[in-house]
Amino acid sequence: MSALLLPALACAQTYVDRNLSVAPGARDGSRPIVIIGPVQPSTPPAPVPAAPTTGPVGSYASDAAGPDIRAKNADYITQFRVIERIPPGSTIRDVAWRYGVASKPAGFEAVLCWQNADTCWSVTEASSGNTSFFNGKDATRPFLLYYRVKGGGHLPQGPVKGDMNQVIVTFDVPG
């Protein structure tokens, strides 16, 4: 995962920022692209297994359109909203994900992050699956999916079309 977090090339980032950003809330049918500077997370803590519970369990699914990847060495983000009111003190029990891109060019990497880029799980090798890595974390916090294609030069086949992405968060409700 550390290779995903290498600083972006200044010229590529400048090009992307200047030419490919989409205004937030655009309703003209354009694909959402959110580009940020390099992600610099700290080392994530070891996963915490879910504590056995006899209380209620809840879940929510959040869908979001994935961005088109237009340049190498730039981070593209899908932001998943917490779409349901979750009781305070609820903790994550399991997270399932699904993402789609038209193709995975050489150098493609993807990570699923909780709340920000400090706690992330690599999902590069699996376009769908589930993990207990985020167990015990605050279920009211959102998830983000970061894409990147590392390497030099241009994308050989042109922009890579993003598809719909989804997270399903199962959580334990206190009490």
Image (spheres, rainbow, N blue to C red):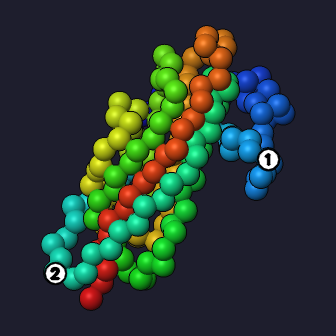
Q: Is residue 78 above or below residue 60?
A: above
Whole-angstrom CA distance, mark 1 to mark 2, is 47 Å
Q: Is residue 67 left or right of residue 170?
A: right
Name the kind of residue labelled 1 in the image: Asp
Q: Is residue 85 above or below residue 134?
A: below
Question: Percent from the top left, x then y, of residue 113?
Answer: 46, 50
Q: Is residue 53 above or below residue 20?
A: below
Q: Residue at x 43, y 61 (%)?
A: 61
Q: Is residue 92 left or right of residue 156?
A: left
Secondary structure at numbered mark 1: loop
Q: Quadrant of the C terminus?
A: bottom left
Quarter assignment of residue 22 = top right
Q: Quadrant of the N terminus?
A: top left
Question: Percent from the top left, x then y, of residue 136?
Answer: 31, 67
Q: Which residue is mark 1?
A: 28
Question: Percent from the top left, x then y, of residue 20?
Answer: 77, 33
Quarter assignment of residue 69 = top right
Q: Residues within 10 Å of mark 1 (few under 14, many from 20)?
A: few
Q: Residue at x 15, y 72 (%)?
A: 52
Q: Residue at x 35, y 41 (%)?
A: 128
Q: Earlier in the sequence, mark 1 or mark 2?
A: 1
The label on residue 168 is none
Outermost residue toward the bottom in this view:
175
Q: Is residue 83 left or right of residue 133?
A: right
Q: Which residue is mark 2?
A: 54
Name the kind of residue labelled 2 in the image: Thr
Task: Confirm whether residue 18 shows in the render.
Answer: yes
Task: Confirm whether residue 73 shows in the render.
Answer: no
Outermost residue toward the front in this view:
29
Quarter assignment of residue 38 = top right
